[in-house]
Structure formats: C-alpha cells, structure tokens
Amino acid sequence: MSQRFHLALMIAAEFGAFIIAAGIGIALFVSQAVSPSLFVNGAILGALLVGAVAIPRLAFRHLIGCCCTNPACTGTAYPQGSSPIVYRCRTCGIEFETSVSEGEDESSTRR
Ligand SMILES: [Zn+2]
C-alpha cells in the first residue's frame, strides 16, 4: 500500500479504536457494571483508552508497513516518532517525513 494510504489508515484505526473504547469505557463507568468503585471504573476507562490507541499504533508501526517511496527499492517502510511521523524503510534505510504530528507521547521520547 502507498505511504499516504498507510498513514490515513493508521490514523483512522487509532481514532476509531479510541472512539469505540471511549464508548465502552464510559458505558462501564456510568453503569458501574464491573465495580461500584470510582477508582476501578476510572482505571478501566483509562486502560481501555490507552490500549485502544496503543494496539493499532503498534500494529501499524511494527507489523503493517507500506511500500518504500524509493523507486529503486521494494522494501517496506514503517512509521516512527510522532512529531512529525517519519517513515523509515527497513531495506534501504531511506527516511521520509510526513506533515502529520500525533503530539507528544511516550513513543516520541523513546527514540
Ligand atoms: Zn527502501
């Protein structure tokens, strides 16, 4: 798949997962289905939101790559960083910056 499509799909997956997790988390929080404790419900909501964004992000950054933009290369590139997101090819090592930033998070400080 193209880099542009990959980026759009990754963001859509993160956003979609976040919305779904927020819906489930808020429903659990309001209904107190798991526990009547505010702390437990808050922790579940937080864990759902973090997990929902982290899972598609990890998948798109490590498992699902896009085609390298180098025409002489048939390798696979994966996104790294978050401000901005930079794609790096694992075969030829070429890096191409995108204009998209995801904001500061722990994955940007780990670089
Ligand atoms: Zn390449």
Image (tube, rainbow, N blue to C red):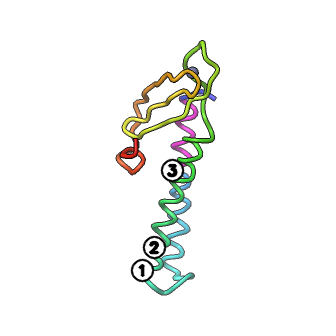
Residue range of the region highlighted in magenta in the rendering = 4-14
- The residue located at (36%, 46%) in the rendering is 109
Query: Which residue is located at x 38 percent, y 50 percent?
Result: 105
Q: Report whether 43 appears left or right of 65.
A: left
Front position in the image: 101 or 91: 91
Label 3 residue SS = helix
Ligand 1 under 8 Å from disc 3 Cβ? no
Residue 17, given in percent of the width and then of the height, sits at 55, 55
Name the kind of residue labelled 3 in the image: Phe
Q: Nearer the viewer, residue 84 or 73?
A: 73
Q: Earlier in the sequence, mark 2 or mark 3?
A: 3
In the image, what residue type sits under mark 2?
Ala
Front in this rendered view, residue 74 or 45? 74
Kindly identify which residue carries mark 2: 43
Label 1 neighbour load within 10 Å: few <14, some 14-19, many 20+:
few
Q: Which mark is residue 107?
A: none
Q: Is residue 68 left or right of residue 36?
A: right
Assess whether mark 2 and mark 1 are in contact (beta carbons under 8 angstroms): yes
Residue corresponding to mark 3: 15
**Dominant secondary structure, magenta:** helix
Q: Which residue is mark 1?
A: 39
Locate the C terminus by quadrant: top left
